[in-house]
């Protein structure tokens, strides 16, 4: 169909699938993600030419880049978004229940079951960005920085667990003041997660109650603790009971403001952001997204 724009990442974990995707998707045009490409301009030009759907083929980082580009376009002109999961973790695709198998994911795109999707605006005095799945701050950033292409290729979705091993014995403590709507928390923390989707770091379910349509972010604050607390957190995470940990504070809110000492950096759907964010806010139903989730 010539009203589709395919955006693909040649560095994604399953980039060899692109040739098959080209044959089956019948997109009118395509863009390979590369340094210097202005996605917002490219998508805007495609919309002017009649594009109705943008298909992001890659991992969470690819989806993140496309979402940020689409949020620069007026809401009335924004095309639909489809996702073909070709990355290492594909966490957001998991929340949307998009099949990992390529032909099934393409079939879903062709059916075009569309639902509105919230997006989260993350900002400070210096920057503004958007994301669709998860922002993970504090020691989570240190785990992401341990990742290499070799570790990703060798360990696949388990690469995050592998990288965490080097951080668990030397956790940084952050003094934070967090305001979830009208409720304030002041405490020492290991990490803060701000979720729109359900999973992070290779389909680890850290926000089981999260919904992409409810107009709320799921805020997870992990208190500072000792080695025994870390064992409990890891074990309950593996059992799917992460939110039951005594070290975990969970709230749902429309807005979160955060101040941290030292400054808490975040990964936004896998992208490390050096600027310290101080505000997270839901942009409700910002993008129409193709999904299998009801």
Image (spheres, grey):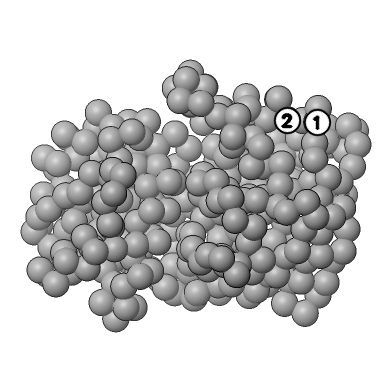
Residue 78's quadrant in the figure?
A: bottom left
In the image shown, does 78 or 98 lie closer to the viewer?
Answer: 78
Contact check, label 2 and label 1, Cβ < 8 Å? yes
Can residue 94 be seen at all in this image of the molecule?
Answer: no
Query: Residue 170, labelled with which disc?
Result: 1
Q: From the viewer's perspective, is 153 left or right of 52?
A: right
Residue at the spot of label 2: 167
Query: What residue is drawn where x is 28% and y is 57%?
Result: 39
Instruction: Give how far across and how far down residue 154 sits, in percent.
Output: 48, 18
Query: What residue is drawn where x is 83% and y is 72%?
Result: 184
Provide the secondary structure element on which disc 2 rests. Answer: loop
Query: What residue is drawn where x is 8% and y is 59%?
Result: 2
Can residue 258 be seen at all in this image of the molecule?
Answer: yes
Q: CA distance from mark 2 to mark 1?
A: 5 Å
Query: Residue 20, labelled with which disc?
Result: none
- Crowd around label 1: few <14 · some 14–19 · many ≥20 (10 Å): few
In the image shown, does 8 or 173 lie closer to the viewer?
Answer: 173
In the image shown, does 222 or 43 lie closer to the viewer?
Answer: 43
* Location of the N terminus (image quadrant): bottom left
């Amino acid at each position: 169909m010539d009203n589709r724009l395919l955006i693909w990442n040649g560095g994604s974990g399953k980039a060899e699938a692109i040739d098959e995707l080209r044959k089956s998707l019948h997109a009118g045009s395509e863009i390979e993600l590369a340094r210097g490409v202005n996605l917002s301009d490219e998508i805007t030009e495609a919309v002017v030419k009649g594009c109705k759907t943008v298909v992001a083929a890659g991992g969470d980082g690819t989806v993140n880049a496309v979402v940020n580009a689409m949020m620069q376009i007026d809401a009335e002109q924004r095309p639909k978004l489809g996702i073909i999961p070709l990355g290492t973790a594909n966490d957001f695709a998991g929340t949307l229940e998009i099949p990992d198998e390529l032909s099934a994911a393409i079939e879903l795109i062709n059916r075009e079951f569309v639902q509105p999707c919230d997006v989260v605006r993350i900002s400070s005095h210096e920057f503004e960005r958007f994301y669709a799945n998860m922002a993970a701050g504090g020691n989570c950033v240190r785990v992401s920085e341990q990742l290499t292409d070799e570790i990703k290729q060798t360990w696949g979705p388990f690469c995050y667990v592998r990288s965490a091993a080097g951080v668990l014995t030397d956790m940084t403590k952050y003094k934070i003041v967090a305001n979830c709507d009208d409720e304030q928390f002041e405490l020492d923390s290991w990490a803060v997660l701000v979720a729109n989707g359900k999973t992070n770091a290779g389909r680890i379910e850290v926000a089981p109650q999260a919904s992409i349509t409810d107009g709320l972010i799921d805020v997870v604050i992990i208190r500072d603790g000792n080695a025994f607390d870390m064992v409990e957190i890891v074990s309950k995470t593996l059992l799917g009971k992460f939110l039951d940990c005594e070290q975990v504070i969970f709230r749902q809110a429309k807005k979160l403001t955060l101040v941290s000492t030292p400054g808490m950096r975040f990964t936004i759907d896998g992208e490390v952001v050096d600027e310290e964010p101080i505000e997270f806010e839901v942009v409700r139903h910002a993008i129409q997204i193709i999904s299998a989730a009801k």
